[in-house]
Amino acid sequence: MAIETKEFLNGSLPEELMQILVTVASTWEDVDNPSEIQVTALSGAMTNQVFQITWPTENLDLHRKVLLRIYGDGVDIFFNRDDEIRTFECLSHHGQGPRLLGRFADGRVEEFIHARTLSADDLRDPEISSLIAAKMREFHSLDMPGARVVLLWSRVRRWLRKAKNLCSPSDIKEFKLDSLDNEIQLLEKAITRDDQEVGFCHNDLQYGNIMMDEEAKSIILIDYEYSSYNPVAYDLANHFCEMAANYHSDMPHILDYSKYPDEEERRRFVHTYLSSSGEEPSDSEVEDLVQLVEKYSLANHLFWGLWGLISANVNKIEFDYKEYARQRFEQYRVKKPQLLGPSLVPLDDIEA
């Protein structure tokens, strides 16, 4: 059953969801009427719809809040929802992120984190960036259920098959999807290393999935839909690529790669990341990871390019997914010869 945003904003909530919200609010003694809720839509989400649910309290200056997440149409293509919930609960057990308060058919209710969601500009703040680097190192070191196996390549291949099934013949031709099978195989062979570190990765560290407790000066990572074991270099590459995005602008789908961090900024981030484990890395260790991260940015462009094409066919959120995909594939085409040379079979030009 699809749920429209206007239904929530008009106070028309499914009975199952309403029961969960009333049950949660009933645990707070200062909420006089658990059925008296206020709903506010939060912007910036591209996979799900997110709402803030608020109850007035006896203290007029205080409100109780939870976060309501409505799953986007067709997003089960990208991940297994039951696996994501298990990840969510396990991370909560590790003291990471919000607690799960309730589930219903189309979404879930989460603890409201009283911290500030970062902005695009925050990612360039050296102090905040250092905190993010240290938090990523901590996150990657978590002992999570499941085999410590890289899922990146199997996921990309699965998404490619799905994109071919969903896209029109003209889109398949325009985005050269028929050439990607071989491209993925060769890219995997070119950048995978026996000595690469594999950790539990977030895989979607855009600024909207990072919160900061200003008082404690601590970072909280949220939204684990895409989390899995992967090369840690891939997760760092994803974070760097997200610095080109501003999902709260007038054109949230437009990426500005002039904002991609320069070499000095990337090296500083990687140094903080490695040193946060307690040992000072050598210059060669820093440089080695910096170079590997750059190569994994290519895999990141393919990953989110395919995500954009699939989303354009299944998601109703107002976002130009196809144009986003086009920019990702274009960046792959531009950066590949710079990072790997002409050794791979070339991906044909993608028309703008």
Image (tube, rainbow, N blue to C red):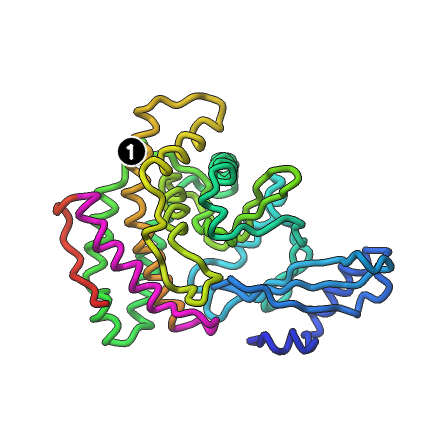
The local crowd at label 1, few if under 14, some if 14 to 19, many if 20 or more residues have their Cα within 10 Å, is: few
Residue 134 image point, x, y percent: 50, 34
Query: On the image, numbered disc 1 is attached to which residue?
Result: 194
The residue positioned 61% from the left and 38% from the top of the image is 217
Residue 185 image point, x, y percent: 22, 50
Give SS at disc 1. loop
Q: Which residues are magenta?
A: 313-340
* Quadrant holding the C terminus: bottom left
Q: 72 above or below 114? A: below
The residue positioned 72% from the left and 58% from the top of the image is 65
User: Is 334 inside the magenta-drawn segment?
Assistant: yes
Q: 13 above or below 215? A: below
> Which is more toward the observer, 177 or 214?
214
Q: Magenta-highlighted stretch: main secondary structure?
A: helix
The residue positioned 29% from the left and 64% from the top of the image is 326
Residue 35 image point, x, y percent: 79, 69
User: Is 46 inside the magenta-drawn segment?
Assistant: no
> Which is more toward the observer, 335 or 127?
127
Splitting the image into 4 quarters, where does residue 166 fall? bottom left
Q: Is residue 285 left or right of residue 319?
A: left
Q: 24 above or below 210? A: below
The residue positioned 49% from the left and 23% from the top of the image is 278
Q: Is residue 307 left or right of residue 295?
A: right
* Quadrant holding the N terminus: bottom right
